[in-house]
Amino acid sequence: MLENRPDNQFVRISRSPEETRTLASRLATLLTPGDLLCLYGELGAGKTTFIQGLASGLGVSDPVTSPSFTLIHEHKGDVPLYHLDLYRLEPDDLAEAGIEAALRSDAVVAVEWAERLPRALRSGALGIEIAFADEAVDARLLSFRSSGGRSDTILRGLAEELGAGSRA
């Protein structure tokens, strides 16, 4: 899913949904309109939980839920956020759904199930893979990977903010 280069990855363990939200909120302080976040992970891994924290950090006050059936939720905050969920979308449906317009918007864009997004549209995105770290608890392994350009700057900022000791 995510390109694996040792110099473009930052890994962090979250031990609870609240810790995942806090981590995402801290990431939000590094983002600017036009940044793209591509989220990967199994059902129930915590992608929407992560985006809830991201929204909080961007100053969004309305509730953040998964847009599984509507595909796109727009949230107004200090920095606007488009939250996309491509789980139910086929590649041929992208143009009809208005996803390319959202990707060109003056907002932070977070895409769940980003592997369904054509690779060309993921260019320059910060990839975030969320995996179950321990089935017995709420722990998650969050792997952040840059793909060049702006995502390199965000990843470096995140590593500095949270401590480079977790950098892979």
Image (cartoon, rainbow, N blue to C red):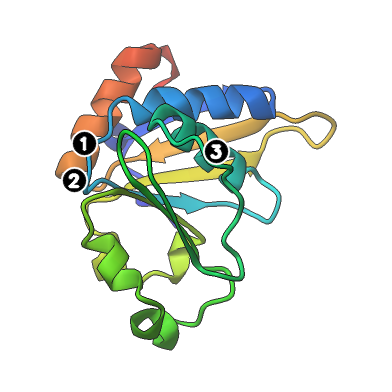
Would residue 81 be visible to someone looking at this image?
A: yes
122 relative position to 91: left or right: left
153 relative position to 10: left or right: left
Question: Are the two marked residues, 2 and 1, in contact with CB atoms closer than 8 angstroms?
Answer: yes
Residue neighbourhood size for the residue with mark 3, other residues' Cα within 10 Å, grouped as few (<14), some (14–19), many (≥20): many
**If you read the primary sequence from the N terminus, does the residue marked by circle 3 or circle 2 appear first?**
3
Taking depth in this image into account, of 117 and 51 the one nearest to the observer is 51
Residue 63: give x, y in percent of width and height.
58, 42
Residue 11: give x, y in percent of width and height.
46, 29
Q: Which residue is mark 2?
A: 148
Quadrant including the N terminus: bottom left
Quadrant including the C terminus: top left
Q: Residue at x 21, y 62 (%)?
A: 104
Distance from the alpha carbon under mark 3 to that under mark 1: 23 Å
Residue 26's place in the image compared with 110, above or below, is above
Residue type beneath disc 2: Gly
Question: Are the two marked residues, 3 and 1, in contact with CB atoms closer than 8 angstroms?
Answer: no
**If you read the primary sequence from the N terminus, does the residue marked by circle 3 or circle 1 appear first?**
3
Q: Which residue is mark 1?
A: 152
Q: Residue at x 29, y 31 (%)?
A: 155
Residue with the most extreme bottom position: 92
Distance from the alpha carbon under mark 2 to that under mark 1: 5 Å
Residue with the most extreme right position: 136
Residue 108: give x, y in percent of width and height.
31, 46
Residue type beneath disc 3: Gln
165 relative position to 12: left or right: left
Q: Which residue is mark 3?
A: 52
Residue 43: give x, y in percent of width and height.
68, 56
Secondary structure at numbered mark 2? loop
The tag on residue 43 is none
Residue type beneath disc 1: Asp
Distance from the alpha carbon under mark 3 to that under mark 2: 25 Å
